[in-house]
Image (spheres, grey):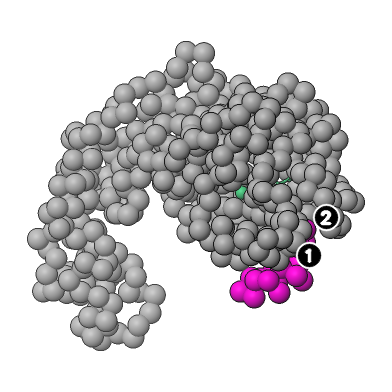
Amino acid sequence: MARLPLPGPELIDLPAPDLPDELDRLLDHLWANGHAAYVVGGAIRDQLLGRESADWDVATDALPDRLLELFPNGAYENRFGTVLTDGIEVTTFRRDHRYRDHRRPDEVTFTDSLEEDLSRRDFTINAIAWGRAGGAGGAPGAAGPAPAHWVDPTDGMADVRARRIRAVGDPGARFEEDALRLVRAARIAAQLGFTIERRTREQMAAHATDVRFLALERIGRELDRLIRARPPSVGFRVLADTGLLEPLFPELAGQRGVPQDKVPGHDLWDHCLATLDAAAGIAPDDETLILAALLHDTGKPETFADGRFLGHDEAGARIASAFLARFAYPGRLTARVARLIQWHMFRYEPAWSDAAVRRFMRRVGVDLVDDLLRLRAADNVGSGWLPDAGGLDELRARIEAQRASGAPLSLRELAIDGHDLQQELGREPGPWIGPLLDRLLESVIADPARNTRETLLVDARDWAGGSGRAGSMADDEAVIGS
Ligand code: ATP
Ligand code: MG
């Protein structure tokens, strides 16, 4: 997208922003009905920076009821009367009041003043508007409202130009009202690569502990945006340096100062962030991997003894699960992240047999093993090593070869199923089936040629009878997960 030339003080010369058609139509409809309507917030800021804007916010003097009249397909999005129509959020100009406990206000008052609306916004770069005032529009020949124009009462454009985040008004008061702004400052700084203006930053530090009053759900939404910043470490560093990390994410803060003999001068926190950035570089859209990188060593502080971190993989998996559950990440994502962390200390040896490679794939999860190798690559980079250190490229090639060979790796691919077992052994369904199938699969993973109905049924009869050999699979057990 073309970047708008940023103006000097004479804003009027700035060209209109480049808006999607449905937003143009929405604004026209409001203007034609005599309402003031302005595009505001993050999307305007992003336009000025030449960044793609995804969600558009419109502020208007039309009251919520009126909005539903004008946009019959719209629907209330929250209890403050924001109406969502065509994916665009339309909010009546408002003035917040009654902040309680440093959280969002429980009540808002509507106003017909754009300036008032802008002045309750968090940062100057988010308090720029483009649109038209209300008035009799539409009628041919009538003296219509003033043409569309930019409005920037807090000089946010100057801050956009200086790539700087500055609170609207008195930063201490603004953070006191709503502590989420503390987290938003760090997140937006990371997202845009902006610095935070000195006074704003000082007040962040002064109010850091207020974040304990925030709803976890709101923090979680910011966390989600923080890990999408590139590189993601920037926002976490701001949080750490302003004292916000400890009250927000104690599991991460606990890594600060823990020694790590990887990169000289780096502690565990530095290693965590370097690994995080490396993961985001390797697979920018892989949320599972990026969260696993962020949390992979959170088990280290509590397991640290005699210069070692025995069991930190298990501990980290547990800590990561609790962390992600707290911020309501989906269960499946949480389980995958925990599994990656649980396995992240695997040690590959060229001496692994092909069966050992298959067993490794099966244990980690055939669908997760690529991510595990990426996590290790990121961990390597975060340790100051080459991404493929530890024979990773060789292991990757061998995993690929196993995939290509079509060797069975899951119960689905086994030549028989639980139903076959019941019939063949003449037994009722029950808890005996699962372990028997697992054992059969293990024998097939050790030797894919055994994956025939006949062979498996012979084994099944053998093993179900209680006798049975232990299976031929002890050869390279020890190297897995060591
Ligand atoms: P993003 O690009 O991630 O959507 P954004 O700045 O648009 O960032 P939103 O949460 O979509 O963030 O909020 C839209 C606008 O509403 C902001 O630009 C800002 O003007 C205002 N705003 C949002 N949250 C707050 C808050 N906690 N305090 C004051 N103003 C806020
Ligand atoms: Mg937004």
Quadrant housing residue 31 = bottom right
Q: Farthest top residue?
A: 264
**For the residue marked with disc 1, what is the amino acid?**
Leu
**For the residue marked with disc 2, what is the amino acid?**
Asp
Residue to which mark 2 is pinned: 112
Against 29, residue 325 (above or below) is above
Q: Is 70 colored magenta in this rendering?
A: yes
Quadrant housing residue 388 = top left
- Whether residue 395 is visible to the viewer of this picture, yes or no, is yes
Nearer the observer, 238 or 429? 238
Identify the mark at residue 386; answer none if there is no mark.
none
Q: Which residues are magenta?
A: 61-83
- Whether residue 202 is visible to the viewer of this picture, yes or no, is no
Task: Decide if ligand 1 comes within 8 Å of the CB at mark 1.
Answer: no
Quadrant housing residue 150 = top right
459 with respect to 106 (left or right)? left
Q: Residue at x 57, y 62 (%)?
A: 25
Identify the mark at residue 63; answer none if there is no mark.
1
190 with respect to 477 (left or right)? right
Pinpoint residue 219: horizontal percent, then vertical percent. 67, 47
Real-space CA distance between mark 1 and mark 2, rounded to the nearest whole angstrom: 9 Å
Nearer the observer, 397 or 66? 66
Task: Decide if ligand 1 comes within 8 Å of the CB at mark 2.
Answer: no
Against 232, residue 451 (above or below) is below
Q: Residue at x 80, y 41 (%)?
A: 119
Numbered disc 1: secondary structure:
loop
Nearer the observer, 421 or 197? 197
Pinpoint residue 414: horizontal percent, then vertical percent. 21, 68
Q: Is 328 colored magenta in this rendering?
A: no
- For mark 1, does the 10 Å Cα neighbourhood hold few (<14), some (14 to 19), or many (20 or more) residues? some
